[in-house]
Amino acid sequence: MNLMLRIRSMLKRKAGFELLNKYFFHKPWLAFVFLAIVILGCATIFGLLRPLDGLKSFVWFILLGTFFIFVDDKTSKKYHHYLCWTVFLIVFIVDLASQGVVRQFFGATPQPNVIAEALANTNPNEAKNFIIEQRYTIIRSVVFASLSFFILTIFNKKYLNVFRVEIRKINRMAFILFSLLIIALHFNPTMLRQQPFLRWFVIFARHAEAQEEMRHVKDIRSAIEFNQSKWNLTSQNNEKTVVLVIGESANRNNWGQYGYSRPTTLPLENTLKKLPGKTVWFAQAKSSEAFTLSSLQQALTSATKANPDAWKSSPDIIMLAKAAGYHITWLSNQPSSEGWISSLGKSADVYKFINHGNWRDSSATDMDLLPELKKQLLATPPNKELIILHLLGQHFHYALRCPEGIAPYRNIDDDSVMLEMQATGKLPWVRQARNDYDNATYCGAVFLSDVLTQIHEQRKQRETTLIYFSDHGQEVGHTQNFSGHSNASEQGYTIPLFIWNNKNKKSSAQKFYNTPFSLEHLDHLLQDTLGIHSIWYDKNLDPLQSPAYPKNGERSS
C-alpha cells in the first residue's frame, strides 16, 4: 500500500512539473521573471541582500536585462547577440555578491559616503585583514555567484533565443517609452542606490571627493579661523580644567551602569562613588550617525544631520576653545592619518598619537594613554585647560582592546546574556564577539576609572569637569546575527554619555538625565561647559540649560 502511495506521489510530482513546464517555462516573459526571482532569492537566502533591496534589484534586472537584450539584437552577429547581455549579467551578479560582503562588514546597505570614508583611510595591510576577517562572507558570495552563473547558463541555453524573439515584437514607440521609464528611475535616489552600474561610479566619485577633501581640510579650517571676528565669541575668565573623552563604538546597552545584566562598568561605578562631585548619566543619548567621521563632525561643530556640511563654514570646538584662551592637549589612540579628525588633533597646543598600527589590529590599548595623560597633569596647569582623549574604545577587533590578562567574560557561555543569545538563535561567532565586546567594555571602564582618579588627584584644587561620550554605538548580536558598525540597527546609535564635575567637594552624587539627547547638539553643551558662547550657540539645544537637567542640590538617584 505504501509503495502505491509513493508511486502515485511521484506521478503527481511529474505531472505537476510537466504542467509547470508547459504553461510557465514555455512563456518567455514568465521564464525571465522566474529567473530574476530565483537569482535574487538566492542572494537573499545567502544573506547578501535585504528583501526590500531585493525588490529594487528585481525591477532593475527586468528593465535593464530586457534593454540590453534588445540592444544585443540590434548589434552585429559577430558577437552572437550576447555581448551586452553578458556584460549586464556579470555586473549584476558581481554587484550583488559585492554588496553582501560590504554589508556584512558595515552592517548596512553600502552607501557612497561610508565606503568613501573607509577607502580613504585604508592601506594594504588593512585590506589584507579585511579579506581575512570577511573570508566566510567572501566564500558565500563566490558560491552565490557560481550558482547564479550556472542557473543563467541553463536559461541562456533553453530560453534566451525564444525571449529574444519576443522582444523583437516590441515596436519602436513602446521601446522609447520603455527607455524613458528606465531613465526616470535614475532620478529616484532610492532606486539609483540599487542600480548595478552607476552605484559604483557614484562610490568611486565620492571616494575621490573624500581624498581631495582630506588633502585640503587644513585649508578649510584655516579659512574658517580667518573669520574669527565674526564669531561673536564671549568667554569666562575663571580658572578651570575640562577633560573631553571621545569613546569609540560603545553601546549604552552593554554598560552595567545603565542596567545591563553583566557588571561591565563596575570599576568606573566604584570610582565615581568614592570621588566627590556630581555625575550625571544621560539615559537616552544617541548619536546622529553610525560612523565615526560624520558623527564627530556633527558632535564637535554646528553641523547636523539636516546640514552635514556646516563644518566647512563654521568653527569646531577646538577653534572656539583656542580663541577663548584655552590651552589644548590632544591625546589619541587612533591612527594619525590625514583627515578632519587628525587635523583637529594636530591643531592642539600639545598632541600625541600613540597608535602606529591600523584601526583593527593595533596592539596599542587605551591604557597606553595613561602615562601621557599623567605627564600632562603633572605640569603646571594653564589658567584654562582643555584635555581631549580620543580612544580606540570598543572598536573591533574587540579582543585586542584589553591589556593581557583582563578578560572577565572569556569563555562564558551559561550566564543570562549567553542563554538569551542562544535562545534567539545567535550564531557561535556572534556570541563570541559579544563576550569579547563586553571584555572591551570592562577594560574601558577600568581606563575611565584611572583617568578620573588621576584628574581628581592632580586637579582637586580647581574646577574640573570630565565629559565622556561615544561617537556611535555597535550591533553585537543585540537584534541581528551580526557584529560591527550598523546604521540599519538602533544599536548602531545607542551611546553612553556622562558628565562628572568636582564642584560638590564633600560628597558624591549620581543622577540621571532622562530626556532624549542627540549627539549632533553636543557642541552647545561643550560651549556652555567651557564657559564660551558664540553665534552658533543655542540655549534651547543645550541640555545643561534644560529644566530636566539635574541641578546642584537635588537628591541623588
Image: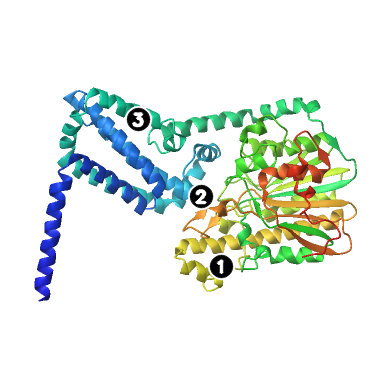
| SS assignment at label 2 | loop
Q: Which residue bears the numbered disc 1?
A: 410
Residue occupied by mark 2 = 488
* Residue type marked 3: Leu
Of badges 3 and 2, the one in the foreground is 3
Report the residue at 43% width, 35% height from top.
192
Q: Do the residues labelled 1 and 2 touch (CB within 8 Å)?
A: no
Give the Cα distance between marks 3 and 2.
30 Å
Q: Which of marks 1 and 2 is in front?
A: 2
Looking at marks 3 and 2 on the same chain, the residue that comes earlier in the sequence is marked by 3
The tag earlier along the polypeptide, 1 or 2, is 1
Q: Is mark 3 on a helix, strand or loop?
A: helix
Q: Is residue 84 above or below residue 334?
A: above
Front position in the image: 24 or 455: 24
Marks 1 and 3 sit apart, C-alpha to C-alpha, by 56 Å
Which structural element holds mark 1?
Answer: loop
Q: Position of residue 400 (x, y in %)?
A: 58, 56
At 77% across and 46% down in the image, what residue appears? 387
- Check if mark 1's residue and mark 3's residue have beta carbons within 8 Å: no
- The residue under label 3 is 181
